[in-house]
Image (cartoon, rainbow, N blue to C red):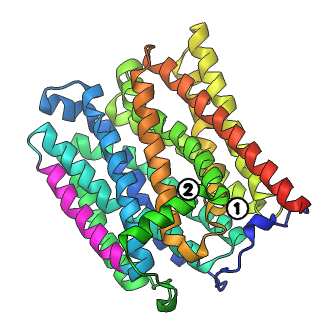
Amino acid sequence: MSAQQLPSELAHRHEPEIQPYTFGWIAIMGLLIALGPLSIDMYLPALPSIAHQFGMSTSIVSTTLPAYFCGLAFGQLIYGPISDRFGRKPPLYFGLALYALASLTCMLSTQFDQMVIGRIVQALGGCVGMVIVRAAIRDRLSPVQMAKAFSTMMLIMGVAPILAPLLGGWLLAQFGWQSVFAFLGLMGLISLVVIHRGFPETLAVEKRVPLQLNNVFRTYGSLLRDNSFRTPALAGGLGYAAMFTYIGAASPILIDHFGVSPQHFGWYFGLNAIGVIGMAQLNGRLVGRFHILSLLQAGILLQFISGLWLLLLTLTGHVTLMLMMFGLFGVVAGVGLIGANSNALALSEQSHRAGSASALQGATQFAMSLSIGLISHTLPFDVLTNLALTIAVCTGTSLGLVRLIHARNQRLASL
């Protein structure tokens, strides 16, 4: 098999009618999906201020991040079947409006439980973009084009983790933590206008499927039994979980442990996002020349080596800010290869149920990030050791799953 050929698992009788895509269309996709990192990263510098407001520790207030992941995981499972029934555009109207209202709720919160509820509802609204973007790309493009499109989109959304904490830190210093959620609500409204004017419907009426509860559960069960979907989705989910475990621990580590100021937090946090952008663009150039699965494996291997580096630092007691940042850079940069290729592999055979497959894949990523992040938080070591051990275990397991995909491809090729 040549580098440009795809395995037989990527062929399917329900292939989409291939259509060219423009940078403008991908930019809209990037805006929709960027609401996720914006909502996660912008408020990280404000966690100590929010904790002071509610009279709690930063670690307790940081539990609003797992709450957000919970909403992301659950909400995507709802939007997937709805988008397969009514098309890609109507769920965007509802979800973005809900996101804007929830952001206003967070801004006006006077008690911590109100903040937690607001964050969950905010996630339930904001996750619609993640589902629709993957499904719309699958509606229009072939697997190789999907990998290239996801790489281009990650250039756009890769800017968000760089700018978000910087902007969040500036808003915090100038106007207080409430202004962060005011900005997020405004972004939700802007996204509503953009999709109304510039986002065409990608799911033809004749391809829509009835919305029945038993069919929804049957479809999700079928996807979980489908190795062509399940294994790459789990492999990619573990890679994302490694990164999001770091994101959840970033504020306690950088601000509380190393004494980085909230205003400078964004510079350290954003530095790692440069790796995502660089790797995503490299991936876009390599797709078609190298096998998608090989590129996925390279990204996971980069994360695994970085996790071992962090673990070595913690075990030897030679942890410095710069040495730790070097390892974290590799963990985050690996996602630039993992995201596009795991998405393309998992969705490659799912054109007839792209919305549900996109939803389940996204829900898997964030459910794994949520559960693994909570496990990491309860480990009996210090926060740095917990993080390093979690990253090493996640990425080591992900490498094993990639080997299973290799074995399946070899069996299919021998038939």
Q: Earlier in the sequence, mark 2 or mark 1?
A: 2
Residue extent of the magenta highlight: 90-108
Residue drawn 49% across and 50% down?
364
* Local secondary structure at mark 1: helix
Q: Taking 166 as reference, is 59 above or below it?
A: above
- What is the distance, in whole Å, between disc 2 and disc 1 at their CAs? 29 Å
Q: Which of labels 2 and 1 is toward the front?
A: 2
x and y, in percent, of residue 399 in the image: 70, 39
How would you rate the neighbour count of disc 2 (Cα within 10 Å): few for under 14, some for 14-19, many for 20 or more?
some
Residue drawn 85% across and 55% down?
411
What residue is disc 2 on?
Answer: 224
Q: Amino acid at mark 1?
A: Gly
What residue is disc 1 on?
Answer: 284
User: Splitting the image into 4 quarters, where does residue 272 fall?
Assistant: top right
Quadrant housing the C terminus: bottom right
* Local secondary structure at mark 2: helix
